[in-house]
Image (cartoon, coloured by chain):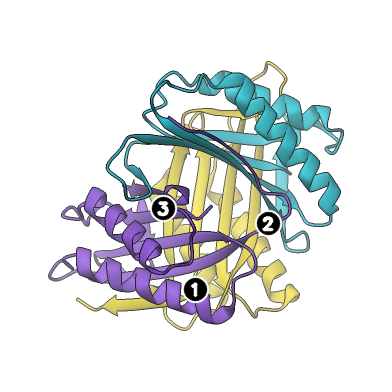
Chain colours: A cyan, B yellow, C purple
Amino acid sequence: MPQLHLEYSANLRDLDTDKALLRLNSALVASGQFGDEVDIKSRAVAHETFRVGIAPVERAFVHVKLALLSGRSPEIKRQLSASLLEALKDVLAVPAGIDTQLCVEILDIDRDSYAKVRFPA
Amino acid sequence: MPQLHLEYSANLRDLDTDKALLRLNSALVASGQFGDEVDIKSRAVAHETFRVGIAPVERAFVHVKLALLSGRSPEIKRQLSASLLEALKDVLAVPAGIDTQLCVEILDIDRDSYAKVRFPA
Amino acid sequence: MPQLHLEYSANLRDLDTDKALLRLNSALVASGQFGDEVDIKSRAVAHETFRVGIAPVERAFVHVKLALLSGRSPEIKRQLSASLLEALKDVLAVPAGIDTQLCVEILDIDRDSYAKVRFPA
């Protein structure tokens, strides 16, 4: 069930998003929190139109949102966000001269109303 | 007020998103939960960069997120997600040989701080 | 920490998204709720594939989602959404003949599991 969104400002041109998604998904698998690796669905979105703050300087950001079925403990969520942040730091070469922020957010999905169907290959 | 996001992996090339959005909106109208059909705002996003799990096989997903003003009962939310999933299944020809997941999530919007203005035509 | 998403239907061709993001971020700075302007991360997304309701007429929407670390009062959230809606109204020339809706939603981010790192320039 986990749904991961990786968003980033498009001035991070060297970010290898295929590599990043594989690295993030691998961190989730390694957490042992998810029964089957196939459940992890991730996507990356580059934002061409963005603004960080109001100062007239170039800045950049990466934002990861992980949505999980509700019920995990605060401790587990902290571990997940920490490991995703480590994965991001591993994979991103922070550009010189550009103030860059990396953030990870964990969000609950309402378990009761979640609906899913899978068509195996 | 309902805000619907349809996201899908771009390897689902045959998905007719205009048809899908009309079908999903029609399911919401048919639910009787929304006073005016014009309140339903839906969009579709194809993701070119995505990864399902970590195994080196081709997979696909569709994810629908419906955001509603808070206050609906769990029963109503379950009915809404079930009807949206049915609509998805009606409209998507699952590709042969690609493991495909369809998911529907219902999310509450904080009613108290929601702000809106409408400019009729 | 605030993360702002501005989404709009692509038929609002005259929307100056750079100007809109600066105006929205400036409203957030003016609110006095955020310690450092650099914390505000905003992006704009145009949706080419969208549908408002089911009637066969042209319609448009703008949707702003502001995600905040949890803990703000309902009163503060109402003030923030009201000021963002005002900023939107200032910056958007509503097209003649197209029913247009502007919405602002405030969402809590789980503070406990939020992870962040900043690399100053």
Tell me whether marks 3 and 1 sit on the same chain: no
Tell me the chain of label 2. C
**Residue B59 position within the rendered picture, expressed as x and y whole percent measured from the top left:** 63, 27
**Residue C21 position within the rendered picture, expressed as x and y whole percent measured from the top left:** 31, 53
Please tell me whether mark 1 or mark 2 is closer to you in this view.
2
Q: Which mark, by number, is residue C37?
A: 3
1 and 2 marks in contact (CB < 8 Å): no
3 and 1 marks in contact (CB < 8 Å): no
Please tell me whether mark 3 or mark 2 is closer to you in this view.
3
Outermost residue toward the left? Answer: C96
Outermost residue toward the top? Answer: B56
Earlier along the polypeptide chain: callout 3 or callout 2? 3
Label 3 – label 1 distance at C-alpha? 42 Å
Q: Which mark, by number, is residue A79?
A: none
Which structural element holds mark 3?
helix
Q: Residues within 10 Å of mark 2 (few under 14, many from 20)?
A: some
**Looking at this view, is B60 or C15 the one in front?**
C15
Tell me whether marks 3 and 2 sit on the same chain: yes
- Quadrant of the frame with the C terminus of chain A: top right
Label 1 – label 2 distance at C-alpha? 36 Å
Q: Which mark, by number, is residue C111?
A: 2
Residue that appears at 29% across and 68% down: C87
Q: Which amino acid, by three-letter code, is at mark 3?
A: Glu
Q: Which amino acid, by three-letter code, is at mark 1?
A: Val
Residue that appears at 35% across and 45% down: A51
Which structural element holds mark 1?
helix
Mark 1, residue position:
B29
**Residue A38 position within the rendered picture, expressed as x and y whole percent measured from the top left:** 74, 31
Q: Residues within 10 Å of mark 3 (few under 14, many from 20)?
A: some
